[in-house]
Amino acid sequence: MFWGGVLFCIAVPAMANTGMTFHIVSILGEAGITRGPSAFILSMMAVVAFPISFLAGFLLERVPLYKLFAFSFFIETIAVVILIVADSFMMAVLFGLARGIAEGIAILCMAIIIPQYFGRENIGSLKGGAGMTSIVIASSLGPLPFGIAFDTFGGYTQILLVMVLFFSVAAVIAWLNRG
């Protein structure tokens, strides 16, 4: 259960990130937001995540990893809910801010979870074998369920609700997996 939980928490953001990134213009288009502002929202996420990752590093010296990792999934859940109900550019900006904050925290947590939980003795094989493999597989598959959902349902609400479920489950798993 422990290994499966760690891999789930590593794979979910990778899958959701590529799925939402590949389809962000179309997803925000459902809210009446055109390509230019959609591209701005996508760029804003990275701009927000960068300084937040420094703050996360500071926080990780004071807050246990499992708490911060779970918090990142909680914020991610809120971000996707905002995306589902977004009906204006300002709501999309709020989504981008929340998503950037979550990503800034999660990226640092994912970088240190394996060495902190398993030590540094076999870090190359653990991160390269299990960690990166799950990230690559999840990232490569991420856009597919979004495309299938759009083709099947004519929109993205259903797949975004699945992402809310995945992020919620990841938050619980991250909280329970204390290393």
Image (cartoon, rainbow, N blue to C red):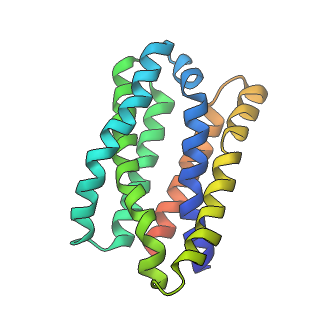
Picture layout, residue 2 above or below residue 81: below
Question: How far from the left and from the top, in percent, is residue 2?
Answer: 57, 79
Q: Residue at x 62, y 45 (%)?
A: 162
Picture layout, residue 54 above or below residue 88: below
Q: Residue at x 69, y 55 (%)?
A: 137
Question: How far from the left and from the top, in percent, is residue 79?
Answer: 42, 40
Residue 55 visible, this orientation: yes
Q: Residue at x 72, y 32 (%)?
A: 147
Q: How many marks are shown on the rendered structure?
A: 0
Q: Residue at x 46, y 47 (%)?
A: 77
Residue 154, picture quadrant? top right
Picture layout, residue 2 above or below residue 158: below
* Residue 126 horizontal side relative to residue 41, left or right: right
* Residue 145 horizontal side relative to residue 57, left or right: right
Residue 112, picture quadrant? bottom left
- Residue 3 or 137: which is nearer the viewer? 137
Residue 179 visible, this orientation: no
Residue 116, picture quadrant? bottom left
- Residue 79 or 17: which is nearer the viewer? 17
Name the image quarter holding the C terminus.
bottom left
Name the image quarter holding the N terminus.
bottom right
- Residue 148 or 136: which is nearer the viewer? 136
